[in-house]
Image: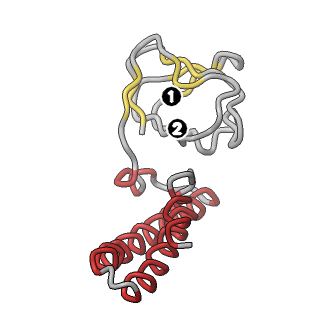
Amino acid sequence: MAAGAVFATFWMRKMIPLRIIAILGNLLFLSYGPLNKLHSVSLLHASLLPLNSFRLYQAVELRRKIQEISATEFKVKSLLPFMDEYKVPQGKFLFHEGDHVDFIYYLSSGWIYLVELNKIIEPLVSLVKSEYLRLVVRESKVFCAKKTPYF
């Protein structure tokens, strides 16, 4: 069961369930290791348990902050430490209609163009709250008319 829990984490895409299953695997290995005198396995999972617990806490806190700010007006700068900056070259698409939603974007400078809607999105507009971008499947192509950093 312990090995199965660890194996399952490699197939998971969502962070919170992944960390919960990883913690379960750590606990199962911590109960299995000493019974079979597998000290290295016990040491490994004793080390991973606090790490997985801390990462679970971070993921839950991030989810809580996102839910909190999605209900009210917020300052995006409070989320910047949790974000990675990417730059899309001029003339490239950020995503296409029908793409699965795997990121939430925040445009820090430049501008983007929603092709099907003939709509320009200016900097500092959170695409989280945009009625043009749905949370299951993208409903528009987003074109970067100039080099555009986003988070």
Q: Residues within 10 Å of mark 2 (few under 14, many from 20)?
A: some
The number of numbered discs placed on residues in the rendered structure image is: 2
Q: Is residue 148 visible?
A: yes
User: Which residue is pictured at 48% across the width and 39% down the height?
Assistant: 106
Q: Is residue 47 above or below residue 121?
A: below
Q: Name the residue furthest top.
A: 91
Identify the residue position indicated by label 1 in the image.
122
| Percent position of residue 37, x then y | 33, 85
Q: Name the residue furthest front.
A: 36
Identify the residue position indicated by label 2 in the image.
125
Q: Is residue 63 visible?
A: no
**Foreground residue among 52 and 102:** 52
Colouring method of the image: secondary structure
Q: Residues within 10 Å of mark 1 (few under 14, many from 20)?
A: some
Give the residue type that dot 1 points to. Answer: Glu
User: Which residue is pictured at 45% across the width and 51% down the height?
Assistant: 76
> Marks 2 and 1: CB-CB under 8 Å?
yes
User: Which residue is pictured at 56% across the width and 72% down the height?
Assistant: 1
The answer to whether residue 115 is left or right of residue 106 is right
| Percent position of residue 98, x then y | 70, 27
Q: Is residue 77 above or below residue 34?
A: above
